[in-house]
Image (cartoon, rainbow, N blue to C red):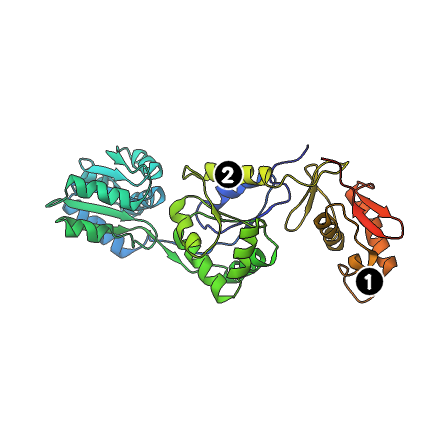
């Protein structure tokens, strides 16, 4: 079997951050990637409030620094550098205990020449919060670098336990920069034009769900996901949670990494799309293409729909009248069906893929299992 495991798959990435890295990994495996971010990332590099909070931190150094995301921690250092405060900031926090919400945050801490004292294995704010509360923060000054909109409950929990908290919001979420594109690919996910929708943040998932509800297509997407025609994939359980709550079947890897997510998608589309056995190799129908023995067939839209109908019949005969219903226009008679079948055979490069059953119609050439 030739080709890549994701050949012919249309995959929509809903993320704004790291979308190129994820897209590149999927495209190398044959996927057709579409970018339709559900949210935009709003950097705060010129945010006067962030600089003001950073100056306050330098003036009164923290006992504990909580880094919730790698990109956020790096963005904070970059913002301080742009304001001429990076050296003062690093000097002020060098003796603090660093608590990281996962390895990406730890990596950003290390890139700044510092060391993390503890890393949350589950990569959740809840685990991080519980760890510090168990350790005790009463009377300590705690700096918390937030991710997304900052509503993770850490500030309130630490303040209630007696800490003095300095909150630092480095980036936030905004509306999609291309709302029409966002809407279009949600509609396509529900109507059958997409094989997979990929989420890397819970806020992004919530935004996608809200739009799907507004447009009245959430039930359609949920039905396709339940049938296996649409894969809803999330980078981890936190991102998957709002999708689960909305009734969608969601897949996510054991390890919260983009690489693990890509491997999961490859596994799903390799194992679940076994294909229909034919003399020319397995035939797999994707949302907008057909893949024969790993090769994406160069079919016309009409040819694709005819082949989809024949594949659905799994070797049973479809009459010319039944196939005529697939063709566009009012003149879809027997001759039009015959011409479309001939084009399908020619374009597919597999003339024996569709059998002519004399006086009955046509059928997909299915091999014995």
The residue furthest left is: 139
Q: Residue at x 24, y 47 (%)?
A: 144
Q: CA distance from mark 2 to mark 1?
A: 42 Å
Front-lying residue, 296 or 246: 246
Asked if residue 304 lies left or right of residue 101, the reply is right
Q: Is residue 189 above or below residue 266?
A: below
Within 10 Å of the Cα at label 2, are there few (<14), some (14-19), or many (20+) other Cα atoms? some
Q: Which residue is mark 2?
A: 264
Q: Residue at x 16, y 51 (%)?
A: 159
Query: Is residue 338 something that shows in the picture?
Result: yes
Q: Position of residue 51 (x, y in %)?
A: 25, 52
Q: Residue at x 73, y 51 (%)?
A: 304
Image quarter in which the C terminus is found: top right
Front-lying residue, 80 or 141: 141
Q: Are marks 2 and 1 in contact (CB under 8 Å)?
A: no
Q: Which residue is mark 1?
A: 332
Query: Is residue 29 something that shows in the picture?
Result: no
Front-lying residue, 346 or 178: 346
Asked if residue 192 lies left or right of residue 73, the reply is right
Mark 2 or 1 closer to N-term? 2
Question: Could you tell me which secondary element the residue under label 2 belongs to?
Answer: helix
Number of labels in the image equals: 2
Question: Could you tell me which secondary element the residue under label 1 belongs to?
Answer: loop
């Amino acid at each position: 079997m030739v080709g890549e495991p994701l050949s012919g798959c249309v995959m929509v990435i809903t993320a704004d951050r790291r979308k190129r890295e994820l897209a590149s990994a999927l495209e190398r495996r044959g996927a057709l990637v579409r970018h339709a971010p559900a949210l935009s990332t709003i950097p705060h590099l010129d945010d006067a409030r962030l600089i003001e909070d950073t100056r306050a931190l330098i003036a009164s150094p923290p006992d504990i620094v909580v880094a919730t995301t790698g990109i956020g921690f790096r963005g904070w250092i970059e913002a301080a550098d742009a304001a001429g405060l990076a050296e003062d900031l690093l000097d002020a926090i060098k003796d603090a205990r660093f608590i990281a919400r996962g390895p990406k945050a730890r990596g950003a801490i290390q890139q700044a020449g510092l060391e993390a004292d503890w890393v949350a294995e589950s990569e959740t704010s809840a685990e991080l919060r519980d760890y510090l509360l168990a350790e005790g923060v009463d009377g300590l000054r705690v700096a918390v670098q937030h991710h997304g909109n900052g509503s993770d409950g850490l500030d309130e929990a630490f303040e209630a336990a007696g800490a003095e908290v300095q909150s630092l919001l480095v980036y936030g979420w905004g509306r999609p920069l291309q709302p029409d594109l966002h809407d279009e690919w949600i509609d396509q996910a529900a109507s059958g034009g997409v094989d997979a929708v990929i989420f890397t943040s819970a806020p992004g998932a919530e935004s996608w769900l809200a739009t799907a509800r507004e447009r009245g297509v959430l039930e359609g997407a949920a039905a396709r996901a339940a049938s296996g025609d649409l894969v809803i994939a999330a980078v981890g359980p936190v991102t998957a949670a709002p999708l689960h709550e909305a009734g969608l079947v969601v897949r996510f890897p054991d390890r919260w990494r983009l690489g693990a997510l890509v491997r999961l998608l490859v596994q799903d589309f390799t194992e679940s799309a076994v294909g229909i056995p034919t003399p020319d190799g397995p035939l797999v129908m994707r949302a907008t293409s057909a893949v024969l023995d790993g090769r994406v067939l160069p079919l016309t839209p009409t040819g694709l729909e005819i082949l989809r109908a024949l594949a659905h019949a799994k070797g049973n005969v479809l009459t010319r009248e039944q196939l005529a219903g697939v063709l566009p226009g009012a003149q879809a008679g027997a001759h039009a069906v015959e011409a479309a079948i001939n084009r399908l055979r020619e374009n597919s490069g597999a003339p024996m893929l569709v059998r002519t059953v004399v006086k009955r119609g046509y059928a997909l050439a299915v091999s014995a299992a």
